[in-house]
Structures are given as structure tokens and as C-alpha cells.
């Protein structure tokens, strides 16, 4: 028998394993690197982690879209004025010679990522990464226009009718509008938002401003509307090297295999421990596959930790609901550690956490101290407007001129 497995780039490891398990040693497997993407239709989910994700999205998007409109000392609170080479951040003004602080910030970002990843896995990916946050908004718009997961799947499979065209056109129009607003907001960190609005309504946007608005708008539309989980799975380097930062005490979203297996359907009122093949009893997983349906990257968490998992916790929320309805304890899928799953002791505070924490605290302290001790100095050299030379009786006289220095 010959089996050709194509489209594997779109298949999860779990699905591949399932297919492989049905093959014999003599079977030939052809894996294609250029398979067509299998579209993921994440089901809507409610619960404590979904609420936290919405809260994080509102907070982060509120800051991003709100800051350009916040005034501080008569100017925009955060403005990166490239032509004047001045970077305003609330009460502080940075000059090119303050580049050192950017180095501090980059070091803080890198160390913060190491620290939080070692402690709590991919919390950044699940709650704060721009790709996740914007994708949530685009999915929300899609949900408003196209309806539930099943309705979306039916619509995509159906032939093109006037109704389908209208629904798709409305969704894309809203996506493009939101993406353009995002591009506009991004550029307003470099050109004051009020000036940018004036230029926009009077059709006086400069070529560079227009280019960057379109560029960032297009990037948002493409990444959050079309590519979604593909960015996390195939483009994001962090998803690939996170394994190096994990250890057996890192908090991860995990399925409790010991408790859940063997999985299988059963009646809510039945004693599932007495059912199943060979009467060895069923585990707590009723195999409803809801955890797979809500997953934004389309994986099955029951196959173990996978690099595609962005730790969004949607599967925890939905499984807890199922456990509630079945009358079982919550937490079949939960935040836990490899050690805890193997019945070993978990040590949250461990040497690498302490080392990262100490370095992080040290850099933050130096950063704050250095900022508080900073004496900003600006120097404007203005050429005198008087004559520099004059001719008198065959002589050339040099005029005195002044240099103005301003310290701020
Ligand atoms: S949601 Fe829970 S019960 Fe349902 S398939 Fe997933 S792990 Fe099993
Ligand atoms: S497996 Fe669970 S936590 Fe991981 S991405 Fe899917 S839904 Fe989110």
C-alpha cells in the first residue's frame, strides 16, 4: 500500500501522528513542504482567561490608539520628532546622544522576555503580543459579520452568491478601515496626530506619510486578517527558540493525560470509571473536541506540548465548562508544569529565575537612577544675521559675530 501525505505544513503534529499510526512499516509517506493552508476557524470562548485576554487587549489597544491624542505641556505626550531629532516622552525629551537609553530598553525587553518565559511560559504570546491582540480584534469583527464558527465554515464552502459577496465585502471593508486607522495611528507617533488629521482632510498628506500609513495598514490587514496563526507558527522566531527557555518547572498550558485517558463519550449521569474498553474505565476527557475547536492555531493540546501553542488558555476555559457540565472537577487542561504532571515537586523559585530577576532588577535600577540624574543639554548654534565682512577704503574688515547657546 502506498500513502501520500501531502499538505503537511497545514497539519498539526497530532494529526500527522494519527495518520502515521494507521500505516505499516512498508508504507511510503510523501511529505510536501508546500501544502495548502488548512484554514482555522476558532470557536468563540468564554471564561476567566478569555476575559483576561479581552482586558489585556482593551488596555494595550487603548494605550496605542490613545497616546497620540494625549497632550503634555502643550504638545503631544509621545512624539518621535525625527526631523528635529527630538523624542518626547511625557515630561522627558531625548536627543540622539541619549541613544544609550534605547540600549537599556532593549536589554530590559530581552531580559524581561527570558524572565517571564522561564516563569510562566508564553504569556507574552497569549496576552500581549501585537499579532495576538490584533488578530483578536479582526476575529471579533469577523464574528460580528459572518456569525459563529459553523456559519463561517458554511459560508466559505458555499458558492459565491450576492449574499456571500455582500457579507465578505462588508467584513473586508471593516478590516481595511481598522487597518488604515492603525497605520494612521502609527504614523501619528512621528507626525503630530492633529497635524496629520488636518493634512488628511485637506488631502495634503506628504508622500512618506502616505507610504507609511499604507504600509502599516497593509501589514496589519495581512497579518491579522489573512495570515493569523501562520505568523506565529512559521514566521515568529520567538515561538521556535522558546524551548530553550523552558524547563520542567515552567508554567505551561497542559492536558492532564493521566486523568483524561482513556478518552471517550459517555452519558453525564453514568459512572465513567466503570465504562470503556475492557471495562478498565474511562478518563475524564469526553472527547468532545471543543479544546481543538477553540484553538486559534488549530492544534490538539491532548497531544502534548507543541511549539504552535501560544498559551492563550482558550482550551482551559472551554474544557472547564465541559467539566462543570459533566460534574467533574475543573482543570483537566490547566496551567501546570511538567514536574507537577509527573507527580514531582514543582519549584517556581529556582536559580535561573533568581539570576534573571536580579539582573532585571539591577538594570531597571540603573535605568531609573540614570534617568533621574540626567542633565539634558540642547545646543543651537545660530549664525549671526549681520554682515560678516565689509569693504572700507580698499580694506576688508571682519565683523564681530555672536554665537547663541541655549541650554535646557
Ligand atoms: S475539551 Fe476537555 S473534555 Fe473535551 S475533548 Fe478537550 S480535553 Fe476532552
Ligand atoms: S492549545 Fe490551548 S493554549 Fe495552546 S494555542 Fe491552542 S487553545 Fe491556546
Image (cartoon, rainbow, N blue to C red):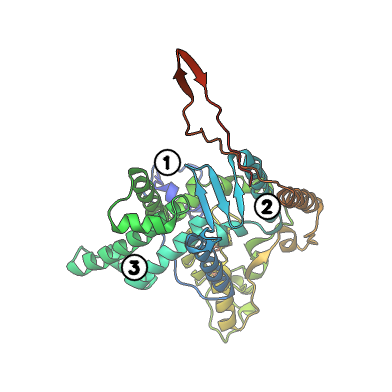
Residue ID at (40%, 63%):
138
Residue ID at (48%, 32%):
386
Alpha carbons under labels 2 and 3: distance apart: 39 Å
Q: CB of residue at label 3: within 8 Å of ligand 2? A: no
Which dot, 1 or 2, sits closer to the camera? 2
Residue ID at (28%, 56%):
202
Q: Give the residue at mark 2.
A: 112
Measured as percent of width and height from the top left, residue 347 is found at: 80, 59
Residue 380 in view here: yes
Q: Give the residue at mark 3.
A: 152
Q: Quadrant of the N terminus?
A: top left
| 137 relative position to 308: left or right | left
Measured as percent of width and height from the top left, residue 157 is found at: 28, 63
Tell me if residue 20 comes above or below residue 177 in the rendering.
above
Q: Nearer the viewer, residue 276 or 366?
A: 366
- Element assignment for label 1: loop
Residue 322 is marked as none
| Ligand 1 positioned in quadrant | bottom right
Q: Nearer the viewer, residue 372 or 250?
A: 372
Which dot, 1 or 3, sits closer to the camera? 3
Mark 2 neighbour density, 10 Å: few (under 14) some (14–19) many (20 or more) = some
Amino acid at each position: 500500500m502506498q500513502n501520500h501525505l501531502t499538505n503537511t505544513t497545514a497539519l498539526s503534529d497530532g494529526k500527522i501522528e494519527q495518520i502515521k499510526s494507521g500505516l505499516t512499516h512498508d508504507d511510503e509517506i510523501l511529505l510536501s513542504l508546500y501544502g495548502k493552508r488548512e484554514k482555522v476557524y476558532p470557536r468563540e470562548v468564554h471564561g476567566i482567561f478569555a476575559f483576561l485576554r479581552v482586558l489585556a487587549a482593551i488596555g494595550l489597544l487603548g494605550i496605542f490608539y490613545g497616546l497620540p491624542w494625549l497632550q503634555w505641556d502643550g504638545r503631544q505626550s509621545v512624539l518621535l520628532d525625527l526631523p528635529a531629532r527630538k523624542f518626547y516622552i511625557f515630561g522627558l525629551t531625548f536627543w540622539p546622544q541619549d541613544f544609550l537609553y534605547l540600549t537599556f530598553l532593549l536589554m530590559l525587553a530581552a531580559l524581561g522576555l527570558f524572565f517571564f518565559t522561564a516563569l510562566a511560559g508564553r504569556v507574552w504570546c497569549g496576552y500581549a503580543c501585537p499579532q495576538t491582540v490584533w488578530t483578536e480584534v479582526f476575529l471579533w469583527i469577523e464574528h460580528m459579520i459572518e456569525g459563529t464558527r459553523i456559519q463561517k465554515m458554511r459560508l466559505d464552502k458555499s458558492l459565491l452568491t450576492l449574499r456571500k459577496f455582500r457579507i465578505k465585502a462588508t467584513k473586508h471593508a471593516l478590516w481595511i478601515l481598522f487597518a488604515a486607522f492603525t497605520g494612521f495611528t502609527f504614523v501619528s507617533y512621528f507626525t503630530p496626530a492633529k497635524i496629520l488629521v488636518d493634512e488628511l482632510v485637506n488631502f495634503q498628506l506628504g508622500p512618506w506619510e502616505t507610504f507609511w500609513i499604507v504600509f502599516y495598514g497593509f501589514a496589519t490587514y495581512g497579518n491579522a486578517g489573512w495570515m493569523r496563526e501562520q505568523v506565529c507558527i512559521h514566521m515568529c522566531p520567538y515561538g521556535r527558540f522558546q524551548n530553550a527557555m523552558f524547563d520542567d518547572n515552567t508554567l505551561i498550558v497542559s492536558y492532564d493525560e493521566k486523568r483524561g485517558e482513556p478518552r471517550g463519550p459517555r452519558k453525564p449521569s453514568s459512572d465513567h470509571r466503570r465504562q470503556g474498553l475492557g471495562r478498565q474505565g474511562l478518563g475524564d476527557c469526553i472527547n468532545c473536541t471543543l479544546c481543538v475547536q477553540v484553538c486559534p492555531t488549530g492544534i490538539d493540546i491532548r497531544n502534548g506540548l507543541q511549539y504552535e501553542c501560544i498559551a492563550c488558555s482558550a482550551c482551559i476555559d472551554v474544557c472547564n465548562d465541559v467539566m462543570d457540565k459533566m460534574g467533574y472537577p475543573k482543570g483537566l487542561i490547566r496551567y501546570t508544569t511538567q514536574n507537577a504532571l509527573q507527580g514531582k515537586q514543582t519549584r517556581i523559585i529556582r536559580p535561573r529565575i533568581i539570576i534573571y530577576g536580579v539582573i532585571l532588577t539591577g538594570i531597571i535600577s540603573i535605568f531609573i537612577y540614570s534617568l533621574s540624574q540626567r542633565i539634558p543639554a540642547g545646543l543651537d548654534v545660530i549664525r549671526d544675521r549681520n554682515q560678516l565682512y565689509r569693504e572700507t577704503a580698499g580694506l576688508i574688515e571682519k565683523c564681530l559675530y555672536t554665537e547663541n547657546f541655549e541650554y535646557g
